[in-house]
Amino acid sequence: MPKKRHQSLYTKPSSTVHPALSKAASAAPRTGREATASSVNERLANLRLSQPPHREADEVTTAPTQPSRTLHPSLNGLFGVPLTPPPAPRRNGLGIARTGRGSGPAGPPPPLSWLLGSPPSQDYLEKSTRPLQNFTTPAVRCPLPGMTAPHDKSLLHMSLKALAKEWTWQAYYNQHLIATVPPRIKSILVSYLGVYGPVGVIRVDDLNAIFALPSEAPDAIGNDEITHLDLSRIIGHSLNFRELKTFLHPVVRISQAETDREDLSEDEPEWASFADHIPSHPSPLRFTNLTALSLSHPGPKASWTGLLSMSPRLATLTHLSLAAWPIPTRTPNSLTATTSSRFSPRVAYGGTDFYSAYDGAWSEAASLLRQLSRATYCLQWLDLDDCETWWDALRWEKEREGAEWTGAWRGMKTVLLRSTRTHSAQTASRSSVSVISPDQRDPVTRQADQVAEYVKHLRAREGLSYIRFERGTDI
């Protein structure tokens, strides 16, 4: 059989010999170890001769060894010779000048990405340009007296702020541990949820988890020590008054055996069936010592109808905050609506219309304030900041429909009538005047002064105690 011939596809390149080596090899042929050694030495010598000379070495050797002649600094200006520039600082491998005496830290130089930095991410830009969801004040302003917020640089402030911002995650994974927080921290936590928490997320289930009763959670701490509850910026957003009513007064669950009883026989007296259906345990109070409540800065769902529906349950309050509440009316969505018939001209649909503030028609608002005053007869402190649109309703005296300043609110001691909004462009120029006449006051201050004078005169006529009004345009 013939042998298979394999054709090599890859061939080893032939090595070329330097001309000088070929001449030396032809002139003196040698054999053995001497020939090998001599040929290697000759090759190295020829390679050194064939390489071009180094320019840096020539520059170093040709550079002058003596420094250039310079003048004293005091003589440079005399002869018009410019000052000798200082030597440039040495640079490292990255081209960055070294200003210190040392050679830098040990190890390789840092990468350029560390030195140049990275551009801000898109999430950082969105967070930095995003408007605040609630107030522009960075710290929590407790609206109730006797309730102090922690310092801005304290550990408690930073912890509660981080807890409020991540409340959606915390409420899900730590819902069984929040009830074990001390009562004082619980009250401050709810205030932080209104300022730093997500808008429209705080629900009644979250409040039930924070202020859980011992019967609802075995490790929960009681709420007997809680006297202040701040629901600012929470009520009206994701919490309505019906849920707040059930939160303050939990409903007792009656067992199915008690509700689905069979009808009693005719032989039993009538009072027996009535006695069996009376619940054995009365409805408990979640806060037995609650005396201060803040409902300031409500959301669009808050209404005076809901407030008056739960006002009988607020009879024990001594401090109440209704800052930034809308005009008292039962039809807030019908301020511009009108109705007409065949026998009458077109009239306003509700008791309060768009022009009530201009016409001084505060009949409905004064009636609602009268109902509120009768229900909260223990009040001593009332916050009506940023309610300048309906302050005139506090001094409505027609047909005795206004608030009972000498009746149910006879124990009132302090009323806040302040505003944070700018109503006059001349306020800044008037600040430099030492004495301001009544005509030079801004409309908000003038309106608050009229309410204060009316209430003080009314109480002085009845011989009641002095009441203090806090007025101003800065809070």
Image (cartoon, rainbow, N blue to C red):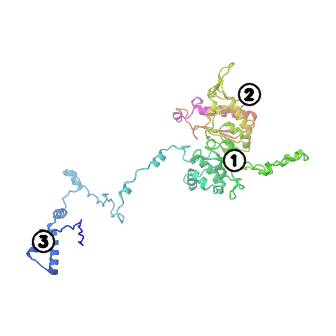
- Is residue 131 visible from the viewing direction of this image? yes
Label 1 Cα neighbours within 10 Å, binned few <14 / some 14-19 / many ≥20:
some
Please report whichever mark, 1 or 2, sits nearer to the chain's N-terminal start. Answer: 1
3D distance between C-alphas at marks 3 and 2: 130 Å
Q: Residue at x 69, y 30 (%)?
A: 364
In the picture shown, does residue 281 fall above or below 395? Answer: below
The residue sitting at the right extreme is 267
3D distance between C-alphas at marks 1 and 2: 37 Å
- Is residue 410 visible from the viewing direction of this image? no
Most frequent secondary structure within the magenta stretch: helix
Q: Which mark is residue 456?
A: none
Picture coordinates of residue 162, whole percent (x, y): 55, 53
Answer left or right for 101 relative to 189.
left
Which residue is identified by label 1?
Answer: 247
Q: Secondary structure at mark 2?
A: helix
The residue sitting at the left extreme is 27
* Camera-side mark, 1 or 2: 1
Is residue 452 shown in magenta?
yes
Answer left or right for 327 relative to 77.
right
Is residue 331 shown in magenta?
no
Which residue is identified by label 2?
Answer: 399
Q: Secondary structure at mark 1?
A: helix
Q: How many marks?
A: 3
Answer left or right for 270 relative to 461.
right
Picture coordinates of residue 88, whole percent (x, y): 27, 57
Label 3 Cα neighbours within 10 Å, binned few <14 / some 14-19 / many ≥20:
some
